[in-house]
Amino acid sequence: MDDIEATIIQNKHIVSNYYTLKLRLSKSMGRVLPGQFVMLKIPGNEVFLRRPFSIYAYSNNTLTLMYRVVGKGTEILSKCPKNERTLVLGPLGNAFHIRKTDKYIVVAGGIGIAGVHTLIKRLGKKASIFYGCTNKEELSLINDMLHLNPMVSTLDGSCGFEGNVIALLGGYIESTKGEDRQIFVCGPAGMVRNLQKLIEKDRTPCQALVEERMACGLGLCFGCVIKTIDEKEPYKRACKEGPVFDLWEILL
Ligand SMILES: Cc1cc2nc3c(=O)[nH]c(=O)nc-3n(C[C@H](O)[C@H](O)[C@H](O)COP(=O)(O)OP(=O)(O)OC[C@H]3O[C@@H](n4cnc5c(N)ncnc54)[C@H](O)[C@@H]3O)c2cc1C
Ligand code: FES
């Protein structure tokens, strides 16, 4: 893992406050695994700390991130023009562990899709995808996976199931009861908590990518800790021991 010089080759608005950022890296990042992330320097001098972003796609020294504008750093990023230079530290963190099973279920909410994008690419048709967003316009975030027939929920009911994605997933979990399954999830904390409640009885194997706030991304500052069931060492660093955790080992 290295700090790598990068040049923006595309910064594209997708819909509402969602963007994709394509960067040409000055050298290879090496092997990238599903669930890993980078710490990106926000161009300019206004934002000191780097910001963590999941690796949405990576090939031939070209890194793609998908991001949602939520604050100062992402606001500045959204205005960065082509050819702007920056720095990328990565790949960082532990990846999703894919075990051999009959059914893979990938659940994502909103920008959480960025965290599971490389995983979905890896699993292909073996994955049953559940995606929740606000309205049908936001479905453009999953345009490149429509051939995998994702099951979709929108909060306003403008497309697919009306309501949250965990309510949609409930029926499927019931209908595949008894089958060997593995679930992967990335999304808002409330969504992950609801998933935990839904599958609590069967304790279905599940891995969650948690998006804690990070300062260093390197395991040095302990600014990203998350509480776990480990009695000896309850606090784990999302950037070092995560960002992918066994859902049954973390306390949300
Ligand atoms: C491992 C990891 C992967 C991530 N991947 C992506 C991704 O692919 N795309 C993407 O858009 N975002 C991703 N995030 C979240 C992203 O890092 C934050 O949205 C970003 O740092 C916000 O920076 P900002 O300066 O715009 O916002 P700030 O000004 O720092 O904060 C603005 C608001 O956003 C909230 N916020 C900031 N960081 C987070 C966070 N990590 N989780 C929840 N709320 C937060 C703050 O509490 C505040 O309310 C990821 C985070 C982690 C830890
Ligand atoms: S962000 Fe510094 S230890 Fe995780």
Image: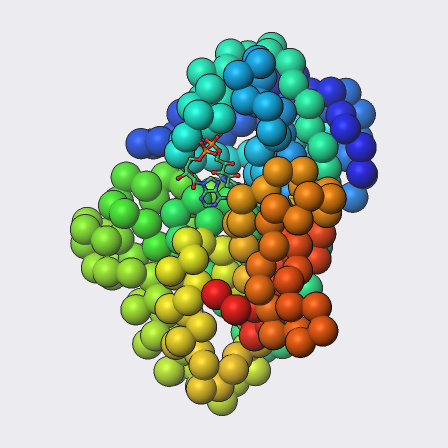
Visible residue check, residue 43: yes
Residue at 28% across / 39% down in the picture?
137
Q: Quadrant of residue 225?
A: bottom right
Instruction: Say left or right for 188 vs 100.
Output: left
177 is higher (above) or lower (below) than 154 = below
How is the protein colored in the picture?
A: rainbow
135 is higher (above) or lower (below) than 69 = below
Instruction: Say left or right for 119 vs 67.
Output: right
Quadrant where the N terminus sits is top right
Instruction: Say left or right for 57 vs 133.
Output: right
Q: Quadrant of residue 244?
A: bottom right
Whole-percent x, y for residue 173 in the image = 41, 78
Decide which of 103, 149 is in the foreground and name it: 103
Q: Quadrant of residue 32?
A: top right
Decide which of 185, 10 is in the foreground and name it: 185
Residue at 54% across / 49% down in the picture?
212
Residue at 66% across / 60% down in the picture?
236
Whole-percent x, y for residue 6 in the image = 69, 20
Whole-percent x, y for residue 44 in the image = 57, 13
Visible residue check, residue 10: no
Whole-percent x, y for residue 33 in the image = 71, 50
Residue at 32% across / 49% down in the picture?
133
Q: How many marks?
A: 0
The single residue placed furthest to the bottom in the displayed view is: 178
**Where ligand 2 lies, by image quadrant?**
top right
Decide which of 109, 128 is in the foreground and name it: 109
